[in-house]
Amino acid sequence: MFVLSFICFVIAVYLVWKRTRLGLAFIMVMLQFAFAWYGYGRSHLPYILYDFINIHDSITNDTMAVALIAAFVLGLCVLIPSLYLLMRLFLFDANYIRGRNSERKG
């Protein structure tokens, strides 16, 4: 996972340095953080908090696990489209980024 994180980092730095495809560079940075976060958590298994809490002692019942996973998935279903719309509105609008009003005629 850390190798994938580093590859995404290198791609993002290259794209920002060349000043091309900045949207893809932003996605690469998000993937870099996701891979690093997953790799860090995976490397500490079975401990959640080292030497105090581990996965085997902290198992929840099935009903609560299903409720937590459902709430997480529904939260992502709301979050991801809203982030896409915000990025489309602000980041991918070249006139907005340059400080120009796109509705001005003259």
Image: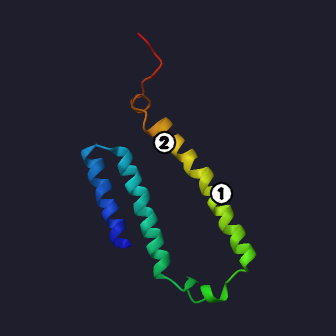
Residue lying at 39% horizontally and 32% vertically, measured from the top left: 94
Q: Quadrant of the N terminus?
A: bottom left
Q: Mark 1 is on which residue type? A: Leu
Q: Find residue 84 and report its horizontal and vertical position in percent.
A: 51, 45
Considering depth in this image, is 99 or 28 the residue closer to the camera?
Answer: 28
Q: Find residue 61 and report its horizontal and vertical position in percent.
A: 73, 80
- In the depicted structure, whether residue 8 falls above or below residue 105: below
**Helix, strand or loop at mark 1:** helix
**Helix, strand or loop at mark 2:** helix
Question: Which residue position holds label 2?
Answer: 87
- In the depicted structure, whether residue 63 falls above or below residue 89: below
Q: Mark 2 is on which residue type? A: Met
Question: Which residue position holds label 1?
Answer: 74
Query: In the shown orientation, is residue 3 left or right of residue 67?
Result: left
Q: Quadrant of the C terminus?
A: top left
Q: CA distance from mark 2 to mark 1?
A: 20 Å
Residue lying at 71% horizontally and 80% vertically, measured from the top left: 60
Residue lying at 44% horizontally and 74% vertically, measured from the top left: 39
Query: In the shown orientation, is residue 35 left or right of residue 82?
Result: left
Query: In the shown orientation, is residue 105 left or right of residue 20?
Result: right
